[in-house]
């Protein structure tokens, strides 16, 4: 694909924080997604790591979103005390149990050994949804990153993103240049070392975080990469609901798993996520729909945008 290493064509160059490049259906269609053909392995293997005992739903939403975006094979890794229940709830997925504390938080201990067989063949990796302990998340990242292919992208969400300032230098270096972050505004504020963020502060903070961690960032309809800024204006306030961010992170990793370059994957997925919310808003109103209801809307919005 022509263009930058991030995978964006030259004609789709970015804007600035003051004058962002507007993401439109016409712009997205300028570079096609992979054709939805082939076997499940041909469409890629995705691993989603998260899900403490109290919050396995985050990883479940992320994994299902990846499948809804066309990824072929899903493996989930959650706290061992809820692994069996998750396996029953999502028969489309293989499920691995991760060691946990007495309170049910994933500790990260032994994660490399548990997940190495999956990660060695994975085409996409998402870490973070449903995790609830910073120390355990740090260890988890430091365990799994070394056993995941160095040339493949990693999506970090929630605690998976916000612990980045505290992971070991070697792990940070291994993540730089291939990380996609999907924080909400509170998480972005932490990454930018700010107390809070106003909406107008988001693009500058996202640029700061992206530069520091060598990452592509999507937050609140703003996407930044390599000093450039894109803006998605579709979507509405109803997307601010519990679990919606997990769906977005899963949508991103689903496209990455299918072989879409990191920046186009972030732009496409963020737009599709917002469009799915718009579709639900026509049925339920601006607020009141659930994150789980976004899932079946993802392939419908994707099909419409692709023009299939």
Image (cartoon, grey):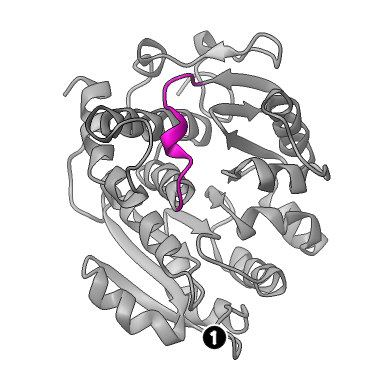
Q: Quadrant of the C terminus?
A: top left
| Apparent side of residue 239 relative to residue 145 in the rendered image (left or right) | left
Q: Is residue 165 above or below residue 244?
A: below
Q: Position of residue 146 (x, y in %)?
A: 63, 66
Residue 148 belongs to magenta span? no
| Apparent side of residue 80 relative to residue 204 in the rendered image (left or right) | left
The residue drawn where x is 37% and y is 63% is 60
| Apparent side of residue 288 relative to residue 141 in the rendered image (left or right) | left
Q: What is the chief secondary structure element of the magenta stretch?
A: loop
- Crowding at dot 1, Cα within 10 Å, few <14 / some 14-19 / many 20+, comes out as many
The residue drawn where x is 48% and y is 40% is 240
Segment colored magenta: 232-242
Viewer-closest of 2 and 284: 284
Q: Position of residue 84 (x, y in %)?
A: 32, 83
Q: Position of residue 153 (x, y in %)?
A: 53, 47
Figure label count: 1
Q: Which residue is mark 1?
A: 99
| Apparent side of residue 69 relative to residue 116 in the rendered image (left or right) | left
Q: Is residue 109 above or below residue 4?
A: below
Q: Is residue 260 above or below residue 224?
A: below
């Amino acid at each position: 694909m022509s263009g930058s290493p991030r995978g964006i064509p030259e004609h789709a160059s970015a804007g600035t924080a003051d004058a962002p490049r507007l993401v439109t259906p016409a712009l997205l269609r300028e570079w096609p997604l992979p054709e939805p053909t082939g076997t499940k392995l041909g469409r890629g293997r995705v691993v989603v790591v998260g899900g403490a005992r109290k919050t396995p739903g985050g990883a479940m939403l992320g994994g299902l979103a990846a499948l809804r975006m066309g990824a072929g094979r899903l493996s989930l890794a959650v706290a061992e005390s809820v692994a069996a229940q998750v396996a029953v709830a999502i028969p489309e997925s293989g499920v691995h149990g991760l060691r946990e504390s007495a309170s049910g938080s994933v500790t990260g201990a032994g994660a490399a050994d548990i997940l190495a067989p999956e990660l060695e063949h994975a085409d996409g990796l998402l870490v973070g949804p449903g995790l609830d302990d910073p120390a355990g998340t740090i260890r988890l990242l430091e365990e799994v990153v070394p056993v995941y292919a160095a040339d493949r992208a990693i999506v970090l969400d929630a605690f998976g993103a916000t612990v980045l300032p505290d992971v070991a230098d070697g792990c940070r270096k291994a993540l730089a240049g291939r990380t996609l972050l999907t924080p909400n505004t509170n998480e972005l504020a932490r990454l930018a070392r700010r107390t809070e963020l106003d909406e107008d502060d988001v693009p500058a903070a996202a640029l700061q975080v992206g530069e520091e961690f060598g990452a592509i960032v999507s937050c609140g309809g703003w996407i930044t990469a390599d000093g450039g800024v894109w803006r998605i204006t579709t979507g509405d306030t109803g997307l601010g609901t519990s679990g919606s961010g997990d769906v977005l992170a899963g949508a991103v990793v689903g496209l990455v798993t299918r072989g879409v370059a990191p920046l186009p994957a972030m732009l496409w997925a963020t737009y599709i996520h917002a469009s799915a919310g718009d579709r639900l808003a026509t049925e339920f109103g601006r607020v009141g729909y659930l994150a789980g209801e976004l899932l079946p809307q993802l392939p419908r919005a994707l099909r419409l945008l692709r023009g299939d």
